[in-house]
Image: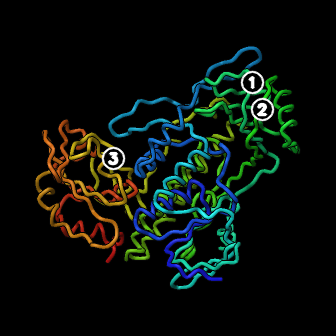
């Protein structure tokens, strides 16, 4: 049974990674289909930390307000040492700044993150097909034919495996998934309520190797219990209640989800095989330390989405090679940091509880990659490949730069009179993502086509002195900085990332 509908991209997996990719593609007019092997949406708290950079992605999609309403800040840790409970701040609380509007990690259970993205897909008319898995696929020069668990065959131009650490898509590619799984190191995770335990602390019992994190806007905790080698836990709810009572003297009840986690540390050898791509846990799996796995998967999808959209509109196929070139080194570095934090926790080092700038994913850069080669022009603060920061500015309906960047388009900022004069004449193809042009000027007033930088903060944050064009990619990274020969340099900058 073959489905002859026109499908651009088939996405296997409807978790945060697959849902982010689908949301990004559908707003570009790409025809997507999302299948999910599980019979329903994920129901547990599992990955509960949404990093600042991921919050910026959610804002771009217009759903950050939902995440902020359903999430909350991380509480102080409460370390139980006999009769004493010592407070400890795991997360440094930072104040928003003009360039970083969301500086702190958001505590949001994974099932709520999924639900927010799924509601977004519904508003775009995308229905997730639950209980439908991918069995196998064959690809050729023009597309991929996938066989589903229903027996149906689906033809698509591209296939993306966002189907988790046991990814069928990855297994079918035959790509190596190098790393290790420590079967002797397991952690029991339970979503439940706990009688008599305060909700203003992330409670930790070091001697019992147990913890309980209060989940926002509910009476639930996420309980984690480190198991000893060879321990096979009884997942019966009564047995779990007895186990936790023996460790802490507290009673848990109303269990809604349980899991036994093993620390996998693995990275696939390639993110792309022809017309097949891997993203999220299908490409890399992490320890739970540092809240990195979900966030890295979302960033994978955010990087891949605009590139698929551009190639489907006529950009060179080689643009898709930059997905692996940019994301695989990031995943490798994040895996190393996550493993370092987990090792510290395993050795009972308090330093393993601390979280800082590296985990926030705001400083990740694609400098030196195929789309941001070394030696290209830069400003005093930014190079091609860096995250495009937010900044105060005014325009019709706009009070900050992120509002101007919101959407699936490219953006070019023209600083200085010479760059502003060249702005209208910059050539841009009619196919693919549109280009929005903004001349930046000092002074007050709101005029169409201008961003008013009254206090000079936009120019200061972007490190621009004099005339410059700054081209920003749809995923919020600097594509190029141009300081002379405006038209020719701009044409060179967009070659390879726009339709011919």
Rendered view: 215 above or below 187: above
Residue 464 x %, y %? 22, 47
**Element at badge 3?**
helix
Q: Is residue 271 visible?
A: no
Front-most of residues 146 and 91: 146
Determine which residue is flagged by label 1: 195
Rendered view: 399 above or below 309: above
How far is mark 1 from mark 3, CA to CA?
44 Å
Q: Is residue 329 visible?
A: yes
Q: Residues within 10 Å of mark 1 (few under 14, many from 20)?
A: few
Are circles 2 and 3 on residues that touch, CB within 8 Å?
no
Looking at the image, is mark 1 or mark 2 earlier in the sequence? 1
Residue 228 x %, y %? 84, 39
Left or right? Give the position of 414 relative to 74: left
Residue 433 x %, y %? 34, 66
Rendered view: 221 above or below 296: above
Residue 17 x %, y %? 56, 57
**Which residue is rendered at x = 51% and y = 42% of the image?**
51
The circle drawn on residue 253 is 2
Front-most of residues 71 and 55: 71
How far is mark 2 from mark 3, CA to CA?
44 Å
Looking at the image, is mark 1 or mark 3 earlier in the sequence? 1
**Element at badge 2?**
strand
Rendered view: 477 above or below 306: above
Determine which residue is flagged by label 3: 402
When asked about the image quadrant of residue 196, the answer is: top right
When asked about the image quadrant of residue 29, the answer is: bottom left
**Which residue is rendered at x = 15% and y = 63% of the image?**
424
Q: Quadrant of the N terminus?
A: bottom right
């Amino acid at each position: 049974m073959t489905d002859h509908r026109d499908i651009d991209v088939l996405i296997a997996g409807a978790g945060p990674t697959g849902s982010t990719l689908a949301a990004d593609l559908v707003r570009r007019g790409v025809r997507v289909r999302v299948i999910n092997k599980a019979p329903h949406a994920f129901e547990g708290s599992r990955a509960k930390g949404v990093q600042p950079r991921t919050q910026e992605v959610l804002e771009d999609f217009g759903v950050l307000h939902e995440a902020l309403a359903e999430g909350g800040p991380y509480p102080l840790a409460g370390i139980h040492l006999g009769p004493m409970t010592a407070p400890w701040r795991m997360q440094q609380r930072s104040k928003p700044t003009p360039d970083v509007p969301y500086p702190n990690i958001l505590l949001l259970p994974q099932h709520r993150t999924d639900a927010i993205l799924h509601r977004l897909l519904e508003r775009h008319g995308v229905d997730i097909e639950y209980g439908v898995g991918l069995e196998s696929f064959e690809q050729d020069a023009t597309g991929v034919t996938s066989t589903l668990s229903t027996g149906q065959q689906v033809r698509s131009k591209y296939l993306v495996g966002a189907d988790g650490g046991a990814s069928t898509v990855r297994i079918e590619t035959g790509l190596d998934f190098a790393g290790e799984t420590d079967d002797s190191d397991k952690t029991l995770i339970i979503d439940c309520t706990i009688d008599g335990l305060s909700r203003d602390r992330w409670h930790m019992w070091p001697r019992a190797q147990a913890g309980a994190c209060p989940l926002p806007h509910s009476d639930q905790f996420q309980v984690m219990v480190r198991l000893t080698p060879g321990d096979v836990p009884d997942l019966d709810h009564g047995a779990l209640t007895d186990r936790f009572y023996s460790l802490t003297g507290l009673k848990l009840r109303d269990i809604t989800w349980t899991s036994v986690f093993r620390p996998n540390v693995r990275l696939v050898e390639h993110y792309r095989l022809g017309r097949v791509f891997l993203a999220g846990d299908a490409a890399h799996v992490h320890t739970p330390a540092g809240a990195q796995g979900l966030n890295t998967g979302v960033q994978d999808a955010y990087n891949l989405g605009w590139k698929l959209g551009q190639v489907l509109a006529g950009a060179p196929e080689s643009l898709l090679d930059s997905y692996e070139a940019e994301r695989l080194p990031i995943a490798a570095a994040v895996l190393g940091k996550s493993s370092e934090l987990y090792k510290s926790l395993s050795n009972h080092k308090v330093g393993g509880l601390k979280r800082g700038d590296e985990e926030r994913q705001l400083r990740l850069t694609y400098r030196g990659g195929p789309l941001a080669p070394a030696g290209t022009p830069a400003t005093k603060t930014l190079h091609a490949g860096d995250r495009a920061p937010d900044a105060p500015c005014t325009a019709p309906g706009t009070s900050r730069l992120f509002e101007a960047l919101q959407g699936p388009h490219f953006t070019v900022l023209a600083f200085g009179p010479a760059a502003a004069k060249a702005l209208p004449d910059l050539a841009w193809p009619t196919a693919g993502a549109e280009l929005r042009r903004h001349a930046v000027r000092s002074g007050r007033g709101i005029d169409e086509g201008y961003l008013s930088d009254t206090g000079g903060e936009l120019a200061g944050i972007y490190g621009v002195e004099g005339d410059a064009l700054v081209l920003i990619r749809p995923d919020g990274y600097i594509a190029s900085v141009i300081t002379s020969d405006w038209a020719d340099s701009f044409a060179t900058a967009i070659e390879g990332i726009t339709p011919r």
